[in-house]
Each structure stands twice: as C-alpha cells, then as structure tokens.
Image: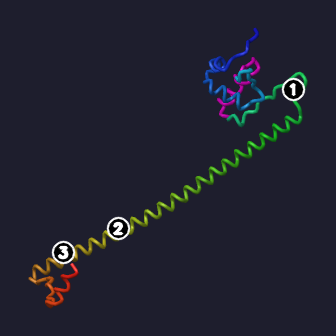
Amino acid sequence: MVMRNLKTKEAAERLGVSQTTVKRWASHYPASFRKDPLGHYVFSQREFGLLQSIQAEIERGRTLEQIVLPAASTPDEPASRPADEAAAERRRELQLRLCEIERSLDQKADEVVSVQVRQHRDELDELRRVVAQLAAAVETLESRATAMVETAKNEEIRLPTAQPLALPERKRKLFRTFF
C-alpha cells in the first residue's frame, strides 16, 4: 500500500501530538524534512517514519538536541559517508560535554544558593539574639522604674518638678520680639 504525502495536520493527528509540535520537530531538522512551494511541510512515508522515531526518542526522555536523524540520501550520494559520521560523532561528543558543563553549572549554582541561605540564617539568628537582649534590657529598666516609683510612693519622696524660669522683664520682651 502506497501512502500519499501527509500535511502537517494529518501527521499530527496520526502521531497524537499538536501541529505545532510536528512543525517544531521538522524545523529542528531542516535537512530531513521538505516544504512545498507554499512553505508548508509535506511528509512522505519515510519522513513520517522519521517523525515517529523522533516521538519515540522523546518518550524515552531524550531532547531534540540529543536525537540524531539519519541523513537523507539521494541517488547521487551513498547512504553513509565517513566524514558525515565523524561530524555526527563530534557533534554528539560536544553535546555530551555541553550537558556535563550545564550539570556542573547547575551544581555550582545550587552550592552558592546554599551558602547564601546559611549566611542569611546566621544573620537572622544574630538579630534574634540582639532582639532578645534588648527585650531583657527593656524589661529590667521597666522593673527598676516601677520599683523606684513604688519606693517613692512608699517613702513619700517627692520627685522634682520643673519650675518655670524667671527671666528678667527686659529679656522677656526681647524674647517676645522674635515671635
């Protein structure tokens, strides 16, 4: 049975994904998927098979960057060339190294955040200690003030009150002129 070319919508329905997903997959591998003269993707049986393999790899947990599709072969060139294989191997190696660097960077970022959290926790603990000391000092002062007031009441000691200052008449007039 010969399968006719599929449009993006048909391919998406058969794969059970959105059209956007199919377009994203196809645009990620421009050498493997072709467009018609109007700029729409058209999928042959072979290309649909590639989409299925992409879907299977993604379901296994791989990313598009990790998936390598076989190069499209034409009648003029052989199916596999050593230079292409070497380039693909080099790409895979670089991708693995990049993944390792990203993992290391994530680990360092986590370590930095952990150190910062510990520093903030220490600062908060220090502030709590200072607040507790201040609260104790205020409590002590309040109890002393209460004790002094009680002692003054019991002993009938009069606390000094403020007496108005008696200014000479001349100074009072001068003072009033300012206001």
Q: Nearer the viewer, mark 1 or mark 2?
A: 1
Q: Is residue 162 left or right of residue 39?
A: left
Q: Does the magenta stretch include residue 58?
A: yes
Q: Name the residue under label 2.
A: 132
Q: Is residue 20 left or right of residue 122?
A: right
x then y, percent, for residue 95: 74, 42
Figure label count: 3
Distance between mark 1 and mark 2 Cα atoms: 78 Å
| Helix, strand or loop for disc 3 | helix
172 to 3, vertically: above or below = below
Check disc 2 and give the amino acid type. Answer: Ala
Task: Give yes or no for contact between labels 3 and 2 (Cβ–Cβ under 8 Å).
Answer: no
Q: In this view, does 72 lie to the left or right of 105?
A: right
Res. 127 image quadrant: bottom left
Q: Which mark is residue 146?
A: 3
Few, some or many residues within 10 Å of mark 3 (<14, 14–19, 20+): few
Q: Give the residue at x 77% y 20%.
A: 46
Q: Give the residue at x 26% y 71%.
A: 139
23 to 97, vertically: above or below = above
**Residue extending farthest top:** 1
Nearer to the camera, 139 or 173: 173
x then y, percent, for residue 174: 19, 86
N-terminal label among 1 and 3: 1
